[in-house]
Amino acid sequence: MGLRFTVCCRLFVTAEPASVMSFDRPLTRPLRLAFAALTLSVLFSIGGQLLMKWAAIRTLGVAPDWTLLAPLMLALFVYSLGVVNWMIAVRELPLSIAYPITSLNYVGILAGSHYWFGETITPLRAVGVALVFCGVLMVALRAPGAQSAAAAVRETAR
């Protein structure tokens, strides 16, 4: 019996026998690419949003000028890369699995806005984002006796 890796509910990676895995068979190459595209979509979306904030801050207290358009164009380009990766991801993944994972944008935006713009993270906001993150884990991970996310993906591909 071979070993495969899975993410456990205790939030660490462990090696378990294949018979108790949430994935009953390995993910196919198109599904691995779809999950990679979904990850890139989240990262590009976070980057695009943070760049849009940066572009907006640059316009404060200055007269409108064409040079202010370059940062906005960069932000929109990066955000568009997220949209393209999103389209690649949802070709293979069910929307009911892919869309909740995009809520990880909340975590990235919270961290990025604190790091780059000095925005305050209140305890209540941190708890709210942590609850969103836990909700994503509940969607993405398999509950005992339930169909795994990967199995749902494979079922819809048939």
Image (cartoon, rainbow, N blue to C red):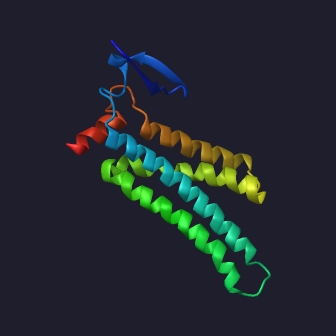
Residue depicted at x 54% and y 48%: 104
Classify residue 119 as left or right of residue 154.
right
Residue depicted at x 58% and y 62%: 48
Give the quarter of the image for residue 52.
Answer: bottom right
Quarter holding the N terminus is top left
Q: Vertically, is 58 above or below 22?
A: below
Q: Vertically, is 56 above or below 88?
A: below
> Closer to the camera, 46 or 110?
46
> Closer to the camera, 99 or 89?
89
Q: How many marks?
A: 0
Residue depicted at x 65% and y 61%: 50
Residue 132 in the image: x percent, y percent? 55, 46
Q: Residue furthest left?
A: 158
Quarter holding the C terminus is top left
Residue 113 in the image: x percent, y percent? 70, 57
Q: Vertically, is 38 above or below 142?
A: below
Classify residue 60 as left or right of residue 12.
right
Residue depicted at x 38% and y 58%: 87
Residue 57 in the image: x percent, y percent? 73, 72
Q: Residue furthest top?
A: 1
Residue 105 in the image: x percent, y percent? 56, 53
Give the quarter of the image for residue 66.
Answer: bottom right
